[in-house]
Image (cartoon, helix red, strand yellow):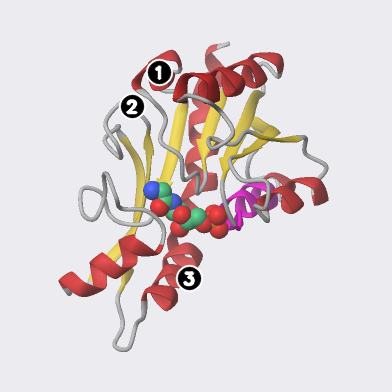
Amino acid sequence: MKVQNIAVFVSGGGTNLQALIDAQNAGKIVSGKITLVIASNPAAYALTRAANAGIESAVVSRKEAATQAEFEEKIVSLLAEKNIDLIVLAGFMCILSESFTKRYPQRIINVHPSLIPSFCGKGYYGLRVHEAALSYGVKVTGATVHFVNEIPDGGRILLQKAVAIQDGDTPEILQKRVMEEAEWQILPQAVEMVCKEYSLKE
Ligand code: GAR
């Protein structure tokens, strides 16, 4: 049994990263260990969360790379250096190319703040997802954790959790409820589930 090395990719506040760190500290993630955090943005508060938890981090900015290939090569070499087994996209707001996702089949997971296949794919990220759910008028939304492949939000679903929409919800209020009631629960659960499966095979 080999504990899986996990890299978490972030771009912003990093509350999902915090949920993973807390789950690890609480003994809810035991088949994997977060050994690297990669931020696409040097101002991401997620970097402070990683530092506070004593986790190594790196910033790889898409803007500073000349091409998508150069951006991804930097990431690939960091992952190889740290022998990463599983990549977790936790509010990572950069697109990864097909050549990147094909390199890590069933080794990248993502948390998305809706019940896929609703409100997902190109252009649906962060608050926009909740704005779309409210403007459509759905009564139930939620979160999904899925494997990442070349289709945006298109890989096999691992876990989903529904969240009720309430009268007076704003995108911000709904985002917070979906995080608290769904994302922060199912992301750590899915990470342990996948790491456990891989660790038992090795
Ligand atoms: C989360 O709601 C996550 O599901 C979403 O961005 C937020 C990041 O928050 N991700 C996407 O929309 C990806 N398509 P966090 O930085 O506090 O974890």
Q: Which mark is residue 105?
A: 1
Tell me if residue 127 comes above or below residue 31 in the rendering.
below
For this view, does 47 lie left or right of residue 135? right
**Inter-mark Cα distance, 1 to 3:** 31 Å
Q: Point out the tag, 1 or 3, that comes first from the N-terminus.
A: 1
- Magenta: predominant secondary structure element? helix
For this view, does 50 lie left or right of residue 190? right
Q: Give the secondary structure at mark 3.
A: helix
**Inter-mark Cα distance, 3 to 2:** 27 Å
Quarter placement of the C terminus: top right
The picture places residue 81, in percent across and down from the top left corner, at: 70, 15
* Residue 14 painted magenta: yes
Residue at numbered disc 2 = 149
In this picture, which residue range is highlighted in magenta? 13-23
Residue drawn 42% across and 68% down? 175
Residue at numbered disc 3 = 176
Q: Is residue 71 visible in this depiction of the protein?
A: yes
Quarter placement of the N terminus: top right
Q: Are marks 1 and 2 in contact (CB under 8 Å)?
A: yes
Q: Residues within 10 Å of mark 1 (few under 14, many from 20)?
A: few
Q: Are marks 3 and 2 in contact (CB under 8 Å)?
A: no
Q: Point out the tag, 3 or 2, that comes first from the N-terminus.
A: 2
For this view, does 132 lie left or right of residue 100? left
